[in-house]
Amino acid sequence: MAVAKTLRVAAMVQAFVCTTVLAAEKTIPILGWHGIQPDQVSAARYAEARDMGMTILMQWAPNVETARKYLDLAQGQGLKLMIHMGDLYEEGKCEAVARALKDHPALAMYHIVDEPLIPAFDKIGRVVRKMNAADPVHEPYVNLINCVGRNPSQWYGGTDRYPEYVKTFLDKVPVKSVSFDKYPVIAREFFPKDAPLRTCEAGYCVKTNWYETLEPCYREAKARKIPMYAFAQSCAYRCQDRWDFAEPQVAHMLLQQNVNLAYGAQLLQYYVYWQTSSHESMPFSVQKPYLRTSVFDRVREVNRRIQARAFVFEGCDVKCVRHTGKEIPTATTRLTVTDLPPFVTSLETPDGGAVVSRLANAGTEYIAIVNRSPEKELTLKIGFTAGVKRIRDDGTVVDAALYTDEYWLEPGSMEIFAAPVQ
């Protein structure tokens, strides 16, 4: 009996050691939008971003010479940059920028344009083709607008259907990824005028059309075998007197990034890293000397959890994404028994809804379950065959048999279980 117990403990320790190595070897790229204001760029500021967990920063530069200086500083701090420059959207100038910067080791990608409409797709396609020819390694990045519920033809530039907008873009523009933004967590009540956009006593809810954006982008990325990139909201602001995005809590950002990962996102983004106006408050105070706000460490914590389990998601193959709950979001598919991997014998969420992702990576099959709520705990009842492992949020691996068959998922949190591919 003592020998058997010792062997079990040794096996668990070995699993822990192996997982720690895997986690260290794999990283999910994390991009901070709007980067650092030009008058604040320094090695210390880039080190600060790296400490927060960013691996890439969007960085505006007025010219190639300045971009090179920024890239040198970033390289010294183990950070990469997505260069944003007006010349990158000019057909006669974009190739020269690529030729000048393409060999720099700190270059991640080129920012071309954000949220374009259909009438601009032909021009963007010409620019992207020139960039791909001048630099086949670093991608020309274009971020798509999200699914909206009002005047869609005006928002998309001629079509009333978001899936058609995404497909048309990918047919016309040879990008190497599908990137989109959608910020779903909003306050249930409007904040009083001029009040700080902090905690909403009435609670939080999720926009109904979040998954109407995710699902088409996920499907197109999978069909075209290109990665999907997705965002999380990391700043507070008022959106044209329609709704308030309150100061983001850890649960709100975890919800967004965990769902992004469940849908197979291979690059995670934050809007924003540095505020661009007084109503955006993350991660630094608006007043000089631009000290950190509490959101800085909230994002840092979310990024820590993401990277601890990067070995599950980096380079993964998502087999399917399904939803549970009395009601499921528009455009999604309800989970059935046939969607479960062979090692899961039962799964239910009796008091709420979850995103359930079945994926595979490096000979291992996983099931990831995300609590869809930004404010309520979720009960997960799940049964397994023998030998299933639980991947905890610090990246360690333990035997699922050590736990009961009931888990309590905090708002936005994710449980992951694994077994060898059968």
Image: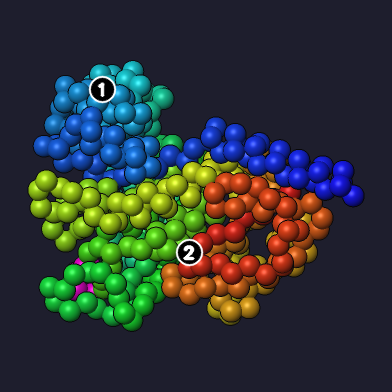
Q: Residue furthest front?
A: 2
Determine the residue positioned at 34% across, 47% down.
Answer: 143
* Residue drawn at point x = 55 percent, y = 53 percent: 393
Q: Is residue 216 left or right of residue 286?
A: right
Horizontally, residue 119 falls left or right of residue 40, namely: right
| Residue 381 vs residue 259, the one in the foreground | 381
How is this picture coloured?
Answer: rainbow
Secondary structure of residue under mark 1: helix
- Name the amino acid, label 1: Asp
- Among the two numbered marks 1 and 2 on one chain, the one whose residue lies closer to the N terminus: 1
Q: Is residue 197 visible?
A: yes
Please name whichever residue, 348 or 10, is drawn nearer the observer in this view of the structure.
10
Q: Where residue 212 sits: x, y (%)?
A: 45, 64
Q: Are marks 1 and 2 in contact (CB under 8 Å)?
A: no
Locate residue 285: give its quadrant: bottom left
Span colored in magenta: 238-242
- What amino acid is found at the position of numbered circle 2 in the picture? Gly
Looking at the image, residue 407 lies above or below residue 14: below
Mark 1 Cα shell of 10 Å, populated few (<14), some (14-19), many (≥20) = some
**What secondary structure is found at the residue carrying circle 2?**
loop
Residue 131: x %, y % from top left: 32, 28
x and y percent of residue 334 in the render? 62, 70
Q: Tell me the number on the disc at residue 412.
A: 2
Residue linked to disc 1: 72
Q: How many marks?
A: 2
Q: Quadrant of residue 49?
A: top left
Image vertical order of residue 369 relative to residue 220, above or below: below
Q: Nearer the viewer, residue 148 or 84?
A: 84
Q: Is residue 412 magenta?
A: no
Q: Does residue 239 belong to the magenta stretch?
A: yes
Q: Can residue 117 be seen at all in this image of the molecule? A: no
